[in-house]
C-alpha cells in the first residue's frame, strides 16, 4: 500500500503484480551493485535499466524509496516509517556501507535524472550519467 501513494486501485494492482515484485528485486540488486563500488557493474546497471524504459519514473521512485529507507535506518527513525519494511535486513546492511550525506546526494542525483528524462534527454546517456554520478559520490 505504501507504494500506491494513497490510491486503493493502484495498491491492489501492485499487490497482485509479480512484475512489480520482480522489479523491486532487481532494483535491490542494482543498489547492492552500486554500493559494492565496482565501476564495470555500475555501468552495466544503466544497460539493465533499459528494459524498464517505459516505466522509468516508477523505477527511479522505487530507488529513491530504498535510499530514503536507508537514510531512516541511519537516523534510527521508527521502523513503521520504512516503506520497504519487508527488506529491512537488506536496508540495514546497505546503511552500513554508506553515509547519511552520500544517501542524500544519491537521492538528489536520481531526482535530477528524472528531470532530465522529463526534458527528453537521451535515456541511455541519462542512465549512464546517473550511474557515474552515484559512483563518484560513493567511491
Image: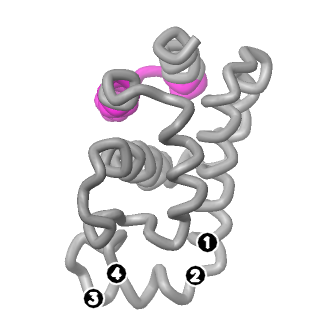
Q: Residue furthest front?
A: 76
Residue 1 — which label?
4
Q: Secondary structure at mark 1?
A: helix
Label 3 Cα crowd, 10 Å radius (few <14 / some 14-19 / many 20+): few
Q: Position of residue 62 (x, y in %)?
A: 44, 54
Q: What is the distance, in whole Å, between disc 1 and disc 2 at their CAs?
A: 7 Å
* Along the line of sight, the residue nearer the viewer: 114 or 98: 98
Determine contact: label 3, label 2, CB under 8 Å: no
Residue 17 — which label?
2
Label 1 Cα crowd, 10 Å radius (few <14 / some 14-19 / many 20+): few
Left or right: where does residue 128 sit relative to residue 15?
right
What type of secondary structure mainly makes up the magenta span? helix
Residue 107 falls inside the magenta stretch: yes
Residue bearing mark 3: 8
Q: What is the distance, in whole Å, between disc 4 and disc 1 at their CAs?
A: 13 Å
Q: Secondary structure at mark 3?
A: helix
Q: Is 67 drawn above or below residue 100 in the view shown? A: below
Q: What is the distance, in whole Å, between disc 1 and disc 3 at their CAs?
A: 18 Å
Q: Secondary structure at mark 2?
A: loop
Residue 21 — which label?
1
Residue span colored magenta: 105-127
Of mark 4 and mark 3, the one earlier in the sequence is: 4
* Along the line of sight, the residue nearer the viewer: 56 or 65: 65
Q: What is the distance, in whole Å, between disc 4 and disc 2 at their CAs?
A: 13 Å
Q: Residue at x 61, y 51 (%)?
A: 28
Q: Secondary structure at mark 4?
A: loop
Nearest-to-viewer mark from 4 and 2 = 4
Q: Is residue 116 visible?
A: no
Q: Position of residue 87 (x, y in %)?
A: 55, 65
Q: What quarter of the picture does the N terminus occupy?
A: bottom left
Of mark 1 and mark 3, the one earlier in the sequence is: 3
Amino acid at each position: 500500500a505504501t507504494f500506491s501513494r494513497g490510491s486503493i486501485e493502484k495498491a491492489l494492482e501492485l499487490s497482485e503484480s509479480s512484475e512489480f515484485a520482480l522489479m523491486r528485486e532487481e532494483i535491490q540488486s542494482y543498489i547492492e551493485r552500486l554500493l559494492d563500488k565496482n565501476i564495470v557493474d555500475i555501468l552495466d546497471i544503466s544497460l539493465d535499466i533499459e528494459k524498464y524504459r517505459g516505466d522509468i519514473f516508477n523505477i527511479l521512485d522505487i530507488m529513491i524509496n530504498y535510499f530514503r529507507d536507508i537514510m531512516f535506518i541511519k537516523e534510527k527513525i521508527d521502523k513503521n516509517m520504512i516503506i520497504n519494511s519487508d527488506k529491512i535486513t537488506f536496508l540495514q546492511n546497505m546503511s552500513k556501507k554508506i553515509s547519511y550525506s552520500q544517501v542524500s546526494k544519491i537521492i538528489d542525483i536520481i531526482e535530477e535524472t528524472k528531470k532530465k528524462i522529463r526534458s527528453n534527454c537521451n535515456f541511455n546517456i541519462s542512465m549512464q550519467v546517473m550511474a557515474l554520478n552515484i559512483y563518484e559520490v560513493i567511491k
